[in-house]
Image: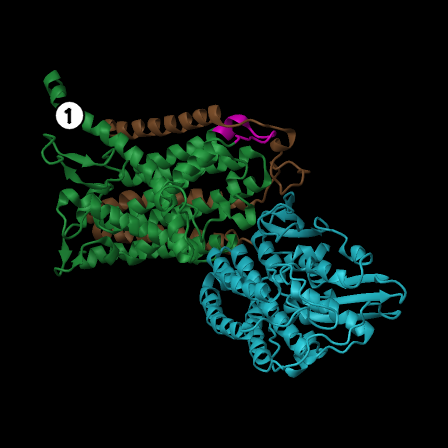
Chain colours: A brown, B cyan, C green
Amino acid sequence: MLSDYIPIAIFVVVATGFALFTLIFASLLHSEKYNKVKFEPYECGIEPTTDARDRYSIRYFLVAMLFVIFDVETVFMFPWAVIFDKLLLFGLIEMLVFILILVVGYYYAWQKGALEWA
Amino acid sequence: MFDTNELVLNMGPQHPSTHGVLRVVLRLDGEKVVDADVVIGYLHRGIEKLCENRNWTQIILLTDRMDYVAAATNNVGYCETVEKLMSLEVPRRARYVRTILCELQRIASHCLWIGTHAMDIGAMTVFLYAFRERELILDLFEEFCGARLTYNSMRIGGLPLDIPPGWDGKVLEFCKIMSSKIEEYEELLTHNRIWLERTKGIGVISGSEAVALGLSGPPLRGSGVPRDVRKDEPYAAYDEMEFEVPIGASGDTYDRYLVRIEEFRQALRIIRQATEGLPEGPIVGKVPRLIKPPAGETYHAIESPKGELGYFIVSDGKSTNPYRFRVRPPSFCNLQGLRRLVKGHLVADVVALIGSLDVVLGEVDR
Amino acid sequence: MFSWLHLYRMIPLLIAQIVLTLFVFFMLLNSAAVMVYFERKVAAMLQQRLGPYLVGPRGLLQPVADVIKLMFKEELRPRAADPLLFALAPIISAAAAFAAFAVVPFGAETTFFGLLSDPLRLQVADVNVAVLVIFAIASMSVYGIVLAGWSSNSKYSLLGSLRASAQMISYELSYGLALASVLVMANSLSLTDIVNRQAGVWFHVIPRWFLFVQPLGFLIYLTAGIAETNRAPFDFPEAEQELVAGYHTEYSSMSFAMFFLAEYINMVTVSAVATDLFLGGWHGPFLPESLGWIWFLLKVTAILFFYVWMRWTLPRYRYDQLMHFGWRVLLPLAVVNLLATAAGVLYFDL
């Protein structure tokens, strides 16, 4: 039932309101003695020579893709787990087959070096 | 796998784990270090030049400020160099006390090293444990010479003061405490799986390469080269002491760690011997009222906690200050190895490797 | 169906619900403050020092002093930063941290000693798919971190947020699979049901907690939980010795406090969920059901203590080792654990 979720929504609103309130409240309180250097991004006291938003390593994208694939599989496992008491042996075999297929992909990713980091 | 741009990242001078003001410009691919450029000089005070304008006694004070976590060792190194230049005989008791001070200082410096090194790798608690013991050493030094960090604890030809009554007993008491505390550090780190994974195989350097790079001290011995000035060219009273020089096998960060841990024990062994066998006698040799070494030059090295600390001094025989004063600081020479060590490792290893070289920027920049 | 009378009868319950919501909110806020104090005191104990002791009796007001200090701090934003996202990131972090707790039950139904006509669940929202909601909201918190890192336009922040996102999504899998193996046993996605499945004892001694049938699942959950909340030894996104402060390097004043708050609330949430899933929630001996929340608090505190203990004892893993561990050790282990649990349920009728 959707109405069950109303308390969560209230909770989120309260939390967001709280965060906004403290941020605004603090902005009324805090001191403001700005100068140019304070607006430099931190790089250990050296003025940055290059922009931080550069192209970064492809490995992060690989992990993200792997995550998307495997997370979708995990989501499949949730309903299976909940009604496992009705599926019984059929469910177990079904899941074994499912995971077997996953393992093939996992093995492939492993061999391709997608799980390598350094 | 694919070509990506390299990220240029400044690590330091204002960074929590570059041990002061070291700056390393890293070129990163992802988190992998492609190249590193070590930039020094943020703490340069011109100590060597200053020394050339001070008289021979005043210089002792300035040497404190180089390796400020091992000031007594610096003092000993300088005084012995001048003594060598003047061919002075130092009484046996003074040499014994120097040995004790040097080894206490080694433990203090290694305490600082193990604390910061462990903290760089994330084990915060070891830091506080190690500083707890360092505090005891500082207390001993305070009792001996009144200062806790920059001691000015040596005079050319001997010692400024004899040891206070009961001091040797306190030193032995400290040895007893310390030997149990080393076990404590080891329990937290030596067989810790995370620690092993973080240090084993990181920054491997072979013995010949370490020699070629001019490394000395624990980084050199960690690579299996048994070079120790205390054994090879004994100074102070080391020729009368019994101790071993620990060496590593594979030359990685873990071996350098083990070498230093063993040096704790050997230092305690030396302190015990020197304190128990402390001879009676004068503490200053026959030193002329005005120190004015004859014309000539000399190089004298001692084993500081960080490696070979050498002084090269030229005297013109006329003035009351050195004509040329040059230090071979172990930290500076060991830092040479950093670029070679970090290549191909990750950002996290850079801090581990800086820690494993145990550099003090006061000594690097002078 | 709907009548005013019906609504009228519901008013006490409604008020109770609102009071409960606000109560939980402020308790969470408090728990973060208490956690800061607790962590500093425990760390001090482990390190043989005193910890905070100047502000208030035994330093109890230290968190308050910290917040006041932060309030008066200058708010800085790097020139090249994205203003909107930079401001949004801490709010997302904090809101997501709070929201995850909304579905966590922390006590049995109670009428508050007859004050209410209908029993009230000690839970902000009782939804039938609570586990999924937690899973979903926990994934939301990564947004705050990624946006913080990216919008700052600072290299340390960026590296921190890249690490954070890669780490969090890697451990999310094992986290989810550890949850799934509990679901196989409980056959419900509702946390209340899961807790109630753990009532009672085996052989008159061992409580029927899932911990005892799922020790591996519990370990996987805890490990993944530590990684999810970016705590040591997996605190890479903010590894001080490497990335200075990671994704919140550029944040100051209260926006920094929001991240700080979020981290501690996330810890409390992970511990509370672990308690519900594996430690039998509010079930425990000696106390009546209505006082079950005391057991709940004790168990959560125990897990939190474990967290703090870990942080101040262990060195930090290296980033690639963490990924290696997550993908090559924890994930296969979690899958095996899930299948083993299913087989166990099938053949031993656990």
Look at the image and say whether residue C80 sits in the magenta stretch. yes
x, y percentage for residue C275? Answer: 27, 48
Query: In the image, which residues are magenta?
Result: C74-87
Helix or strand or loop: what does disc 1 sit on? helix
Q: Residue B354 versus residue C213: which sits nearer the camera? A: B354
Q: Residue C125 versus residue B285: which sits nearer the camera? A: B285
x, y percentage for residue C311? Answer: 42, 53
Q: Quadrant of residue B359?
A: bottom right
x, y percentage for residue B49? Answer: 81, 55
Q: From this viewpoint, is residue B200 visible?
A: no
Tag 1 subunit? C
Q: Residue C255 versus residue C33: which sits nearer the camera? A: C33
In the figure, is residue C36 to the left or right of C199? right
Q: Mark 1 points at which residue?
A: C12
In the figure, is residue C89 to the left or right of A10? right
**Mark 1, residues whose alpha carbon is within 10 Å: few (<14), some, or many (≥20)?**
some
Please give the name of the residue rendered at 46% of the width and 57% of the height, measured from the top-left corner: B125
Please give the name of the residue rendered at 51% of the width and 55% of the height, measured from the top-left corner: C318
- The prevailing secondary structure element of the residues shown in magenta is loop
Outermost residue on the top side: it is C4
Please give the name of the residue rendered at 15% of the width and 53% of the height, measured from the top-left corner: C285
Q: Relative to residue B365, is residue B187 depicted above or below?
A: below
x, y percentage for residue A40? Answer: 62, 33
Q: In which quarter of the image is the N terminus of chain C?
A: top left
Q: From this viewpoint, is residue C243 visible?
A: yes
Look at the image and say whether residue B225 sits in the magenta stretch. no
Q: Residue B320 versus residue C298: which sits nearer the camera? A: B320
Question: How many circles with numbers are drawn on the protein?
Answer: 1
